[in-house]
């Protein structure tokens, strides 16, 4: 599990861990019933206190995104839950908002944006196939 902590962005460390795990789940990089790293292991890897990881895991558990098995670890819950779907929606909305803000600054019209989106969607299968082959 690849999590990166930034001490300079002003977001609390536990929130960074929480957000990145949510993203990994929503994007399918963490699968249902996949085991998360133990608290101490992740804390050592990220160079944070175990309490920081506990806080992130507790919030994820409260949201129903992970569950603990006593003595057996912490696991990803079923990502088809409504909470996971809302998280996926939230992620894409943030990306769209950023795109729209930048497009506005560059004086793109809605038609321009839709044209570019359609063009990019048309080449996606080819890009995905090339990426799968290790090309680009």
Image: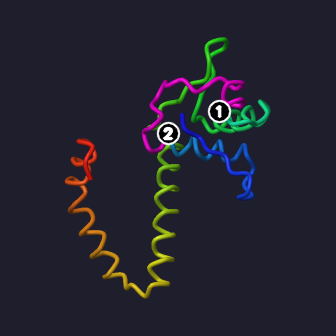
**Residue 75 shown left or right of residue 118 in the figure:** right
Farthest residue in the top direction?
Answer: 71
Q: Earlier in the sequence, mark 1 or mark 2?
A: 2
Say which quarter of the image contains residue 54. Answer: top right
**Residue 64 shown left or right of residue 11 in the figure:** left
Is 38 inside the magenta-drawn segment? yes
Q: Where residue 72 appears, x then y in whole percent?
A: 61, 13
Q: Where residue 108 appears, x then y in whole percent?
A: 39, 84
- In the displayed structure, would residue 110 be above or below residue 36? below
Q: Where residue 107 appears, x then y in whole percent?
A: 43, 88
Is 1 inside the magenta-drawn segment? no
Which stretch appears magenta?
26-45
Q: Nearer the viewer, residue 89 or 28?
A: 28
Dot 1 and dot 2 residues touching (CB under 8 Å): no
Say which quarter of the image contains residue 122. Answer: bottom left
Q: Where residue 20 appears, x then y in whole percent?
A: 58, 45
Farthest residue in the bottom direction?
Answer: 107
Q: Residue at x 46, y 58 (%)?
A: 92
- In the displayed structure, would residue 103 be above or below residue 70? below
> Which disc is residue 61 wearing?
1
Give SS at disc 2: helix
Q: Residue at x 27, y 43 (%)?
A: 134
- In the displayed structure, would residue 2 be above or below residue 72? below
Q: Nearer the viewer, residue 16 or 78?
A: 16
Q: Residue at x 25, y 48 (%)?
A: 135
> Which disc is residue 25 wearing?
2
**Residue 49 shown left or right of residue 2 in the figure:** right
**Residue 12 shown left or right of residue 107 in the figure:** right
Give SS at disc 1: helix
Within 10 angstroms of label 1, few (less than 14), some, or many (20 or more) residues? some
- In the displayed structure, would residue 79 be above or below residue 11? above
């Amino acid at each position: 599990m690849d999590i990166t902590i930034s001490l300079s962005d002003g977001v609390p460390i536990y929130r960074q861990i929480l957000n990145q795990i949510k993203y990994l789940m929503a994007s399918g990089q963490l699968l249902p019933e996949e085991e998360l790293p133990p608290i101490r292991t992740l804390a050592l890897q990220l160079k944070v206190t175990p309490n920081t990881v506990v806080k992130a895991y507790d919030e994820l558990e409260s949201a129903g995104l992970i569950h603990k098995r006593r003595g057996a670890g912490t696991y990803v819950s079923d990502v088809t839950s409504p909470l996971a779907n809302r998280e996926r929606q939230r992620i894409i909305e943030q990306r769209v908002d950023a795109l729209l803000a930048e497009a506005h600054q560059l004086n793109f019209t809605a038609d321009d944006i839709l044209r570019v989106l359609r063009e990019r969607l048309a080449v996606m299968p080819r890009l995905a196939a090339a990426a799968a082959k290790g090309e680009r």
